[in-house]
Amino acid sequence: MILSEKNIIPVLLGLFILTSCQKFEGTMPEPLDYGYLSLNLSLTITSEPANGRILAVNTDDFRVTIFAADGTEVMAFDPFSTAPAEVQLPTGEYYVEAHSNNLVDAAFENPYYFGRSDNFTIDKEELKSIDIEAELANTKVAINYSTNVVNTFHSYTGTVTVVSSGASLFYAQGETREGYFLTSPLDVEVNLSYTKLDGTTIDRTFTASIADPQPRTLYNINVDATLEDGKVVFNITVDEGFETVEINLGSVANFDGCALSQFRVIEDDDIETWDFTLNPDGKADQIDFTGNNASETSSYVLTFDGDGNLVTAESPEAFGKREVFTYDGDGFLVKREEYTENAGSFQLYRVNDFTYNVNGQLSEREEYYINTDGSRGSLEFLKKYFYPDAGTKNPTRVEKHGDSGLDNVEHYTYDTHPNPILEAGIWGCDDCVDSELFAFADNNITSVARYNADESVLMWTLQITYTYNAEDYPTRSDYLYVGGEDDGYGYSQTFDYQCN
C-alpha cells in the first residue's frame, strides 16, 4: 500500500477473538472473560521530498503498543515483525499506537511516522476490526536559493536549529534535501559570502524563525539576494505549504498582532504616502515619503537602542532634518530635540520636554524654540493632559497654554481598538502625525471638541470614523470638521499592515 502525497499511512489493525501465548504485562486483576486480538500491519510507507527521492519505510520495523484506556501499557511489539499471530486480551477498553523507530530532533532523510487508534472495547468473544492511521509527525524544512544567489555569491549555506534542544541541521552549499525536525519552534540562519577581486569578502547572515511549526508541513525557506553597488539586497519567503509569508532577511518579525507598513493621507486629489520598512519588533527602521503624484520624495532613517527605543531619526533629503530622543530610567520619552541642517552641520532649533505623573501617564508636553546662540527661545505651547482614571493612557481633557496663559481646552473620546501610530513608534516622523495624541494614546481618537479657555464656547468639533480589519486595527479613518472656519472640511487616512 502506498501513501498519498500527504504521507498518511493507513495502518489496519484487525482485532479478532483468537488465542495466544503472549504474556500479559500490567497490573490488571485476573479477568473472568477474554477477547482476542490479531494484528495485521503490512504496508509500504513512502515520502516524496522536493528533490524527488523516494524513501520507503517498512512497517515491520515499527513499534506497535497496546494500551489500556487509562494509558497503562499492556503489551508492545518492537519491532512489529516479532508480533505473534494471535494475542489474548482481557475484556476491557483499549487503544493502539504505532510509530516508526527513528525519532530524532533533526535529520535528513528521516521521516518519523506516528498513529493512534480510537479507543475500542474488547468484549467476551467479540470480533472487532480497528483502523489506525499513522501520519508524518515531523516538520520538514527546505532551503532554496534563487538563481541570483547561485550566480552571484561564492558561498551560501544555512542552518536550522530546534530551539528547545539546540539540535540543528547544516545545509551545505548545494544541499537540496529536506530536513526532518521535531515539531517545535525552529530558528533559521542563512549565510551568504561574496569574494571581491581584491580578496576581501562581503558576508551577510540572515535569520528567520518558525514560531509555531506544524506536522505534515513543508516550510520552504526561499532566499533571493543580489549585489547592488557593493551592498546585499535581499528577500526571504517562508512557504508553509498553505500560504507564503514574505519576511525581509535580517528583519525577521517576532511581534504579535499587526505592524503599520503604510500610512496615507488623502485630501481630495492630494495623496501623501509614508511607507515603513519594519524592524523585528514591528517598528520602522526607515520611513519613505512620497508626495502627490510622486512630485516630492524623502526618507527618514530611524535607529533604536537595545531596549527598542527610538533614539535618532534623520532625513537629509527632506529639509535636512535630524531628531534625537532621550529617555529616563523607566523607558519614558523625556526629550525630543529637532535639528536642521545649516552650512553643512546640524543645529538644534526646537525642543519638546515630556513630563509624566506617578501613574506613568503623560502629564505635560512643552515645546519651545532654541536661539542661534543655543539659549532657550520662545514658547510654542505647553500642553497639560488629564485622564479619567489611573489605568488609561487616553487623556480625555487637554489644556493648551501659551505665553499669555491658557489658550483653549480640548475634550477627546476614543475607540477600544489598538492605535497603530503608537505601536509603529514613528515619533521620528513628525509630519506623519497630526497630533501627539495619535502617537501616545493607547486607542484611536474618535472625536475632538475644542473650547475657549473657560470652556464657555465650543469653537469646533472634529469627528473621526474608522473601518477596521479582522485583527481590530483601523484600515481607514475619515475626518470631518463641524463648526468654526473649517466647517464641512474633511479628509481621510488609510493604514496597511504586516500582520502575524
Image (tube, helix red, strand yellow):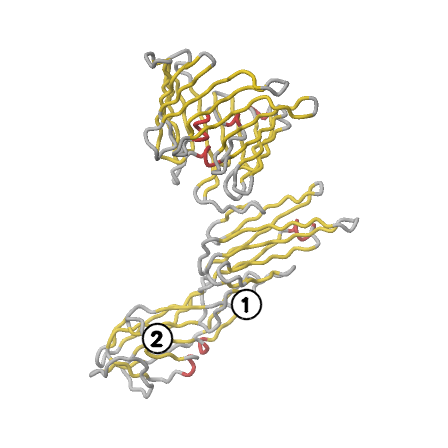
Q: Quadrant of the C terminus?
A: top left
Q: Residues within 10 Å of mark 1 (few under 14, many from 20)?
A: some
Query: Which quadrant does the N terminus fall into?
Result: bottom left
Of mark 2 and mark 1, the one earlier in the sequence is 2
Q: Position of residue 365 (x, y in %)?
A: 46, 24
Write down the quadrant of residue 130 in the picture.
Answer: bottom left
Q: Which residue in the rendered view is the most extreme toward the right?
A: 198
User: Which numbered disc covers residue 128?
Assistant: none
Asked if residue 76 lies left or right of residue 247, the reply is: left
Rendered view: 281 above or below 447: below
Q: Amino acid at mark 1?
A: Glu
**Residue 290 on image: x %, y %:** 57, 28
Single out the mark in the foreground, 2 or 1: 1
Q: Residue furthest bottom?
A: 21
Q: Which sits in the foreground, 289 or 321?
A: 321
Q: CA distance from mark 2 to mark 1?
A: 27 Å
Give the crowd class for mark 2: few <14, some 14-19, many >=20 residues within 10 Å. Answer: many
Residue 388, image quadrant = top left
Taking the image as shown, residue 387 lies to the left or right of residue 264, namely left
Mark 1 falls on what kind of element? loop
| Total marks placed | 2
Q: Is the residue under label 1 in contact with that under label 2 (CB below 8 Å)?
A: no
**Residue type at numbered disc 2:** Leu
Position in image of residue 9 (x %, y %)? 42, 68
Q: On the picture, is 226 further left or further right than 112?
A: right
Relative to the observer, which residue lies in front, 47 or 272? Answer: 272
Q: Residue at x 62, y 21 (%)?
A: 374
Q: Secondary structure at mark 2?
A: strand
Estimate the x, y position of residue 44 in percent, counting from the top left: 46, 73
Dot 2 corresponds to which residue?
A: 13
Q: Farthest left residue?
A: 32
Please give the residue where the numbered disc 1 appears in the rendered image. 109
